[in-house]
Image: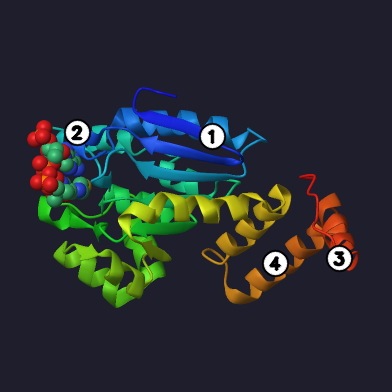
Amino acid sequence: MTETVLLDRTDRVAVVTVNRPDKLNALNAQVQRDLFTVLKELESDAGVGVVVITGAGDKSFIAGADISEFAGRSPLDQRQAMRFPRMFDVLSDFPKPVIAMINGFCLGGGCELAMSCDLRIASDRARFGQPEIKLGLIPGGGGTQRLPRLVGLGQAMRLTLTGDMIGAEEALRLGLVEMVFPHDELRDKTFELAGRIAGMSPVTLRLAKEAVRASEKLPLGEGIVYERDLFCLAFSTEDKAEGVEAFLAKRPPEWRGR
Ligand code: COA
């Protein structure tokens, strides 16, 4: 628990809530520091299999970077504020699956944060966009790179050049989110999915995430070789032995996380 980020744990699912509802959970420097702190804790917590990120209140997931921090900032100050490691990269490289539970406005840095997660599950009331162009800016949290990878070059260009907002159904159709549920069911549906994923072997989840993430960086041939190596690495785990043995014995597996 930190000043601006709440942390709850249910079984093996941790819920990280950005808690500035009066500012629609805009990402200021404190939120970013607090997210780093909480993620660091969750990374080493063996009791946590899956992380869910959401926004406090009923209206917004994250309405972007805190625009008030941009006023009067020099390029050097901004560069310092954007120093590496960036939170977006920490999320995409996080060694456990991370799910964005998108409960409302998902704009600018909020959309970029959601795109850095492994899965995006949205309320039917959620609204999406990269409105930076309207501020005389461009996306700076990976949006110009991750958005085209999810929705294709043309749609990414449309959203980036117009700053237009789209609704959840359109986001689903474009591939910006993977699932949409009625607002009141969002939490239960997300937890059901997160719980099922958290019930898999953590060591295998890590290999699976790493292999799929590699597809963002590697050409196909190299990616196939990398996948083969991670597949064979899975043969070194106790959970591979258990999974195969349990299947053959027609019983559920008991993962050991090794
Ligand atoms: N940064 C800082 N404050 C923000 C914010 C942001 N990105 N988004 C919302 N807020 C604040 C508002 O200034 C307002 O604060 P106040 O009550 O102290 O005036 C509060 O959150 C509520 O927002 P409000 O604009 O009154 O809600 P709304 O329902 O009328 O509009 C939005 C919602 C999302 C359309 C509108 O807030 C908005 O356009 N936000 C900016 C989105 C953006 O450009 N993000 C990218 C930043 S790079």
Where does label 2 land, which residue? 22
Task: Name the residue at 18% across, 53% down.
Answer: 132
The residue type indicated by label 1 comes to Arg
Mark 4 neighbour class, 10 Å CA radius: few under 14, some 14 to 19, many 20 or more: some
Q: CA distance from mark 4 to mark 1?
A: 32 Å
**Considering only vertical position in the picture, is 152 above or below 64?**
below
- Mark pair 3, 1: CA separation: 32 Å
- From the top left corner, tell me how far across and down residue 51 is, in percent: 52, 44
Q: Quadrant of residue 134?
A: bottom left
Q: Residue at position x 72%, y 51% from top? A: 201
Amino acid type, label 2? Asp
Q: Is residue 208 left or right of residue 130?
A: right
> Which quarter of the figure is the C terminus placed in?
top right
Residue receiving disc 1:
9
Amino acid type, mark 4: Glu
For the question of whether residue 48 can be seen, the reply is: yes
Q: Nearer the viewer, mark 3 or mark 1?
A: 3
- Crowdedness of circle 2 by 10 Å Cα count: few (<14), some, many (20+)? few
Residue with the mark numbered 3: 250
Image coordinates for residue 97, horizontal then vertical, percent:
56, 51
Q: Residue at x 74, y 61 (%)?
A: 230
| Horizontal side, residue 22 vs residue 191: left or right | left
Asked if residue 63 shows in the view, the reply is no
Tell me the tag on residue 227. 4
Query: What amino acid type is highlighted by mark number 3?
Result: Lys
